[in-house]
Amino acid sequence: MGLEPNSWRWSSSGQTSSSGFQDWSAGEPNYGNRDETCVLMDAVGKWRDKPCDSLNGFVCFTDSDSSQVSYSYISTPRTWADAQAYCRKHHTDLALVESAVQNSLVSSTRAASAEAWIGLYRDPWAWSDQSLSPFKNWRDISPNYPYSQHCVTENTAHVWDDAHCDEKYVGLCHTDLKLRSFVRMTLRTSADLTHPLTNAQLLQKVEAALKSQGWSDFRLTWTIRPTIAPPQTTV
């Protein structure tokens, strides 16, 4: 439940716990079979990590305003991802639990012996720059993470294996390339395009349009090329 990249996170925010509350069953989470990265609440209200493709009932929460949260138990068995999609369509999201009171409320929504998905999940592998990626290329028997192999190697077939971090291999490095793109625009206006205020306003509008399309980490500059006069013909 810490702050490192591969910590447990809540579906509704994609962030780690704001309160630090947790209520794991004894011996949990144990990352059993190397694929238990989603969380369900067991019959007594304790948390267990389970494979995300397991079929279970689930608990959604609805946040109607800042002071009122309600929970709903759905008994139809679904995978964690399908349960998440259902909750996001019909409620707010899979259950968010940040206190003992909320944990008790979620537990009380279920049938006495029912296990149910809640909104906690994790990705146990992160890149060295602390970023996460959905792409994986493990070999068939990897990773076997519970056995203290916390770093990754790539073999000549370009598949991955987890290894002890104190083992020695050659290293592969990468460099982020900063690309520069040029955009040519044709504008028809009576405004003075050489005026600094006009330039700034146009850049603000272009920046807002690019951000609305999902662009990020960019910088816009304004350059006016000198007009080249057409060649003169002497008769």
Image (cartoon, rainbow, N blue to C red):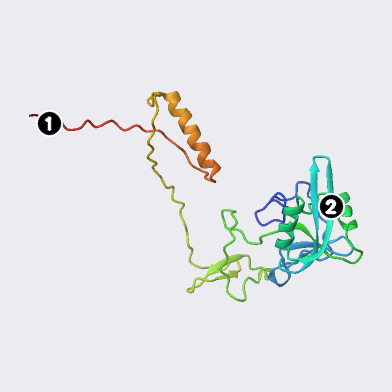
Horizontal and vertical percent position of residue 39:
77, 61
Task: Compare residues 193 and 158 and report the one nearer the observer.
Answer: 193
Mark pair 1, 2: CA separation: 82 Å
Residue at 70% across, 61% down: 81
Task: Compare residues 129 and 8 and report the one nearer the observer.
Answer: 8
The answer to whether residue 76 is seen in the rendering is yes
Q: Which residue is mark 2?
A: 71
**As drawn, which residue projects farthest toward the left?**
235
- Please state, as top left, top right, bottom left or bottom right, where the C terminus lies in the image: top left
Horizontal and vertical percent position of residue 17:
75, 50
- Could you tell me the amino acid type at mark 1? Thr
Instruction: Say which mark, if any, is on residue 233.
Output: 1
Residue at 83% across, 46% down: 69
Left or right of 156? Residue 49 is: right
Which label's residue is closer to the chain start, 1 or 2? 2
- Please state, as top left, top right, bottom left or bottom right, where the N terminus lies in the image: bottom right
- Could you tell me the amino acid type at mark 2? Tyr
Q: Which is more foreground, mark 1 or mark 2?
A: 1
The answer to whether residue 1 is seen in the rendering is no
Task: Compare residues 187 and 152 and report the one nearer the observer.
Answer: 187
Q: Residues within 10 Å of mark 1 (few under 14, many from 20)?
A: few
Residue 78, compared with residue 204, is above or below; it is below
Disc 1, disc 2: CB below 8 Å? no
Left or right of 20? Residue 183 is: left
Residue 220, compared with residue 30, is above or below; it is above
Q: Secondary structure at mark 2?
A: strand
